[in-house]
Image (tube, grey):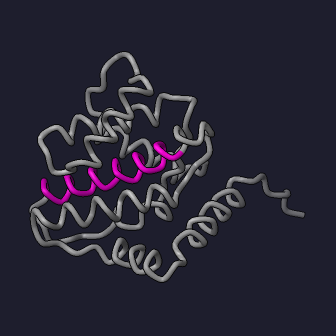
Amino acid sequence: MTIMRRTLTAAFFVVLAGGAAAAPPSKQEVLMAISVLEKNITSPDAADAAKTVVVYAQESDDVMVDIGPEQLPWVSEKWGLEKSREQNNQSLLLAAFVAGNIRSQIKNDKAEDDTYSGWIFAIDAYKRLRTKGAFQSPAIDSLKKMEDDGTLLQHAKDVQFKDEESDAPRPPFA
């Protein structure tokens, strides 16, 4: 994992997890939290569910989530919202990405990053968040267009492959 990716990951986990509980959540607890986010990402329970999901992803050896600018292209966007609302939406979309990613891994009983499933969950969450107030994410709109065109899965594979290459040891300079 690159230093930038680790830094970004740590920053988002700190923002979302805040004062996380001492014991990591169980698989059952995280599945219930994912269900809360799936049913209503704008509910009062969504913030706690998001924390549970993110803490589980960080603490559990049962899942692996790669987080960086390629996986979360919307994090650098400014949507023209009030700062707290923009941060809340960014955090919920991060949690949605993580939720979709780890739900797939739990379902398949395989700890292998699933960027595609994370994006699908985040796209759905984005649609639902927009019903509570208008904002536009060009990055998520682009992901949605790729999904509509049938190219999102390949794009996710390309992103994952690029990440694997960037993490591979490089030969020394001659």
Q: Is residue 86 magenta?
A: yes
In the figure, residue 15 lies in which quadrant?
A: top left
Q: Magenta segment, which residues?
A: 84-104
Characterize the magenta stretch by its predominant secondary structure. Answer: helix
Look at 19% across and 61% down and name the residue there. Answer: 129
- Residue that sits furthest to the top in the current view: 22
Q: Horizontal placement of 172 versus 104: left or right?
A: right
- Location of residue 125 by image quarter: bottom left
Please name the residue shown 49% across and 52% down the image.
67
- Considering only vertical position in the picture, is 141 above or below 133? below
Q: Position of residue 75 (x, y in %)?
A: 34, 62
- Please give the name of the residue rendered at 27% of the width and 64% of the height, measured from the top-left corner: 126
Give yes or no for residue 8 being in the magenta stretch.
no
The quarter in which the C terminus is drawn is bottom right
Q: Nearer the viewer, residue 132 or 51?
A: 132
Residue 135 in the image: state x and y as whole percent: 17, 72
Vertical order, 62 against 99 (above or below): above
Whole-percent x, y for residue 157 in the image: 62, 65
Depth order, front residue of 118/66: 118
Q: Residue at x 47, y 78 (%)?
A: 146
